[in-house]
Amino acid sequence: MKVLYVCSELFPLLKTGGLADVSAALPPALHKAGCDVRMLLPAYPALQAAFTSLRGKPLLRLPHAGYIGPHWGESLAANPPRLQCGHFADNRLFTYLIDAPALYHRAGNPYLNPEGQAWPDNAVRFAWLGWAAACLGQGLDDNWQPDIVHCHDWHTGLAPIYQRELALREQPLAASVFTIHNLAYQGLFPNTVFDQLGLPPDLFGIDGLEFYDQVSFMKAAIQFAQRITTVSPSYAREILTPEQGVGLDGLLRSRVDVLSGILNGVDYKVWSPAHDDVLAQTYDVQDISKKANAKAQLQKKLALQPRPEGLVFGVVSRLSEQKGLHLVQAVVDEIAANGGQLALLGAGDGDLEQAFAQAASKHPGQVAVHRGYDEALGHAIIAGSDVMLVPSRFEPCGLTQLYAMRYGTLPLVHRVGGLADTVVDCTPNHLGDGTACGFVFDDFSVAGLQSALARAFALKQQPELWKTVQQNAMRLRFDWDIAAQSYQALYRELRPSA
Ligand code: ADP
Ligand code: GLC
C-alpha cells in the first residue's frame, strides 16, 4: 500500500500543536505496519534547513494544468514551484518538499506572521499544498504512484477536490483520506479568493466549498474526501451535533457512512520517564518514588516552594478558548489556599496570559507561569507535576493527558472528545477494578472543575491509593502501532488490491 502523507507541521522541526507530534509518529508507524509511506510538506525554512535532497534525483516541477489548480501570480511564474525529493536527518522517510520561496520562505509560523496575524495569501499558500498532493496522487512522479493521499487538517483541505477534478478528465489513480484534527480551525477565506483556486465556478456553492458566502477549506475536504477520520471515537460522534459541529454538523451527518474516529497514540521514544533527557533522575513504574525528584527539580526550576507534600498542578497548553483554561484561572486562589501549586506553560490568548501572570504575582512561590513555547519545560512540567489539568471545552484527542499518564502524573479532564476516551475517573468502582487513572468531570463549569479538584486533594491524603492510580496510569499504552493498523484497514477498504 503506497501512502502519501500530507501535512503542514512536523515535530521536532516545526510545531504549533499536537498535529506536529502526530506527523512525526504516525508515518513511521504506518511504515512499520508495511505501508510504503512518503510525506509531502511545504518547504518552510525550518524544514528546508534540516532537509537532505537525494543526490541525482530530479526536482519535479508542478504542472500548470489549464484552469485547474491555484493561481500562479507574477512571483510564482518567475520562479515556479518545484518538488524536492529527499529526507530529514532524524526521519528517514522519503519526503517531498514544495519548494516555492514566494509562498513558504517566511519568518513566523506556517500560518501567522511574526506579529501573530494570518498571512494574507494563506488561501493560495495552502491551495498549493493541496494541489501538489493531488498532482502526486494523479501520477506526477513517474517512479512512485500512491494508492492513498492522506491529508491532515484544513491546510490540506483542497487536495480531495483537486484530486477529483484531475480525475474527471482521466482515470482516478489515488483515493483520498482526510483527517480532522480540529474542526474549529476551518481555513475560512473571503469569497474573493475563490478565483485564485482554479476550480470550476459551480464549486462555489452549497454543494461545494462555499460556507456562508466564504470559502471553507475544511468544508471542501469533508465534502469530497472518500474517507474522513477524526482523532478519537468520541469526537467523531460529537462533531455530528450542532454544539460541536461548528456549522458543519449537517454536512458531516450526511457523510457519516465514511466518517470514523481513530485514537491518536504516543511516541514513547519522546515521552517516557525511563529515558527523558530533561530529568536529572529517570524513573519508571517500578521505582515510582523517584518521581519526587522530578517534582523537586520542577519546583526549583520555577521558583516554587520546595514542598514535597504540596500538590502540583501542571498545565502545558495553547491558551485558547478550546482549552477551558478560564476555569483554571477561576480556581487558582483555591488551589493556593489548599496548599497546592500551579505550574503553567502556555501562550496564546492575551487576556488569559495576563490573568495568569497576575495570579503568579499574587501567589509567589505557589503559582509559576511561563509564557511562551518551550519543549523542554513542557517535559519538565508533565513529569514533575502531580496532576495535569486539561479542562478543555472540546478536545478532538488531546495528547498532554496521554503523556502525563506515562509519567505517573494524573490527568484531570473534562469528559469530552479524546479526553473522555482515554481517562478513567477515580470512582470507587474504577478504583476497585484497577482501571482508574485520573479525574474526570462532566459539568463544564467552575463548579465542575472544583468538584474534581476536591477529589484530587482527597485522594492525595491516601498515599497508597494515589500510588496505585499512578501505576495504573503508567502501565497504560496508547501505541501508534494500533492506530496505524486502523488506518491501514481503512486504506484497504478503498484499495483492496494494493
Ligand atoms: P493541541 O494540538 O490542541 O494544542 P494536544 O494536546 O494534541 O493539543 O497537543 C499539544 C502539544 O503541544 C503537546 O505536545 C504539548 O506538550 C505541546 N504544547 C502545547 N503548548 C506548549 C507550550 N507552550 N510549550 C511547549 N509545548 C507545548
Ligand atoms: C488538534 C487537537 C488535539 C489533537 C491534535 C492531534 O490540535 O486540538 O486534540 O490531539 O490535533 O491530533
Image: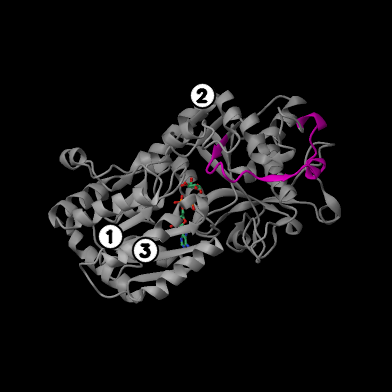
Seen from the viewer's position, the closer of residues 339 and 320 is: 339
- Three-letter code, disc 1: Asp
SS for callout 1: loop
Q: Residue at 46% across / 70% down in the picture?
A: 357
Name above or below for residue 218 compared with residue 76: above
Residue 250, picture quadrant: top right
The percent coordinates of residue 276 (x first, y second) are 34, 63
Seen from the viewer's position, the closer of residues 485 and 256 is: 256
The residue that mark 1 highlights is 386
Which colouring convention does the figure follow? one colour
Question: Mark 1 or mark 2: which comes first in sequence?
Answer: 1
| Marks 3 & 2, CB-CB < 8 Å contact | no
Instruction: Using the image, tell me which numbered label, if any, was put on residue 332.
Output: 3
The percent coordinates of residue 5 (x first, y second) are 57, 42
Q: Nearer the viewer, mark 1 or mark 2?
A: 1
The percent coordinates of residue 14 (x first, y second) are 55, 59
Q: Is-magenta flag for residue 340?
A: no
Measure the alpha-carbon separation of dots 1 and 2.
Answer: 43 Å
Residue 360, picture quadrant: bottom left
The residue that mark 2 highlights is 493
Question: Mark 1 or mark 3: which comes first in sequence?
Answer: 3
Name above or below for residue 45 compared with residue 38: below
